[in-house]
Image (cartoon, rainbow, N blue to C red):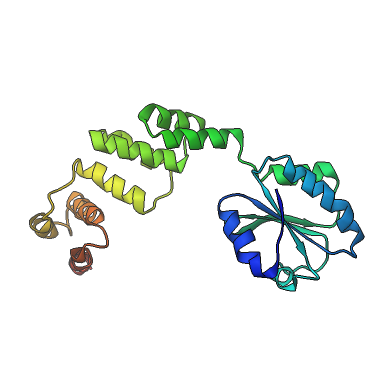
Amino acid sequence: MAIDVTDARFETDIIERSRTQPVVVDLWATWCGPCTTLGPIIESVVEATNGAVVLAKVDVDQNPAIAQAFRVQSIPAVFAIVDGQVVDGFTGAMPQHAVEEFVARLLPSESGSQLDGLVAAGDELSLRAALDIDPGHEPAVIALAELLVGRGDHDEALALLARIPENDETRRLAAAARLGSAPPDDHDATLTALLERVKTDDDARQQFLDILELMGPHDPRTAAYRRQLTAVLF
């Protein structure tokens, strides 16, 4: 699929569109000899993706703002845009096989598509199959850990979460796994009792932090209890 993009449509036709599918931007001009050679090659290669990739053609003489946005110094200049960011590019004419390799890098791999499908299925067998393909696949790890915590397999959930970098979601799930089950909604009595032990008892300090993690930053008590913990420890 090829579209002619103007300065006025830059945000919509290139940036926003790239959030749902890769966009190849071909910056060219009518006076540019190499552009007339490269242009049909890019169009043919992108057309062969059957809509998986979009080709955005930009006449730099008519649309100087786009050329400036890409800091183009010579043409033809070609950029690959994914999720609003430049991820690849080249300048000058390229043979067809090189253009095919360039576009192929933008296509989801067979294993990537399979992983996405397994995670979307969401059942335990599918999630475990996804992790057989990629043991560190973050969405699969988080989804399976959620299932494991829900049914009480806390040790396995913690082992799974250790495979991937820590983030807000992994901290929440790990806290739920360590606590064994979600504490009652009114945490004040438990936290107050734990606060007396946190300075000398590592387990009490971890339980205190885990309860705060489950309460989350939007609970107005969380920040207050964190300040009390800091005061006791330091």
Residue 134 at least partly seen: no
Residue 147 at least partly seen: yes
Residue 96: image location, x then y, percent: 83, 43
Classify residue 184 as left or right of residue 222. left
Q: Is residue 48 above or below residue 188?
A: above
Residue at (56%, 51%) from the top-left corner? 20
Residue 58: image location, x then y, percent: 75, 62
Task: Choose between 223 and 101: the one closer to the eye.
Answer: 101
Residue 214: image location, x then y, percent: 24, 52
Residue at (26%, 55%) from the top-left corner? 213
Task: Choose between 4 and 126: the one closer to the eye.
Answer: 4
Residue 197: image location, x then y, percent: 13, 56
Q: Is residue 170 above or below residue 30?
A: above
Q: State which quadrant residue 60 falls in.
A: bottom right
Residue at (37%, 31%) from the top-left corner? 123
Classify residue 10 as left or right of residue 57. left
Classify residue 135 as left or right of residue 190. right
Q: State which quadrant residue 122 falls in.
A: top left
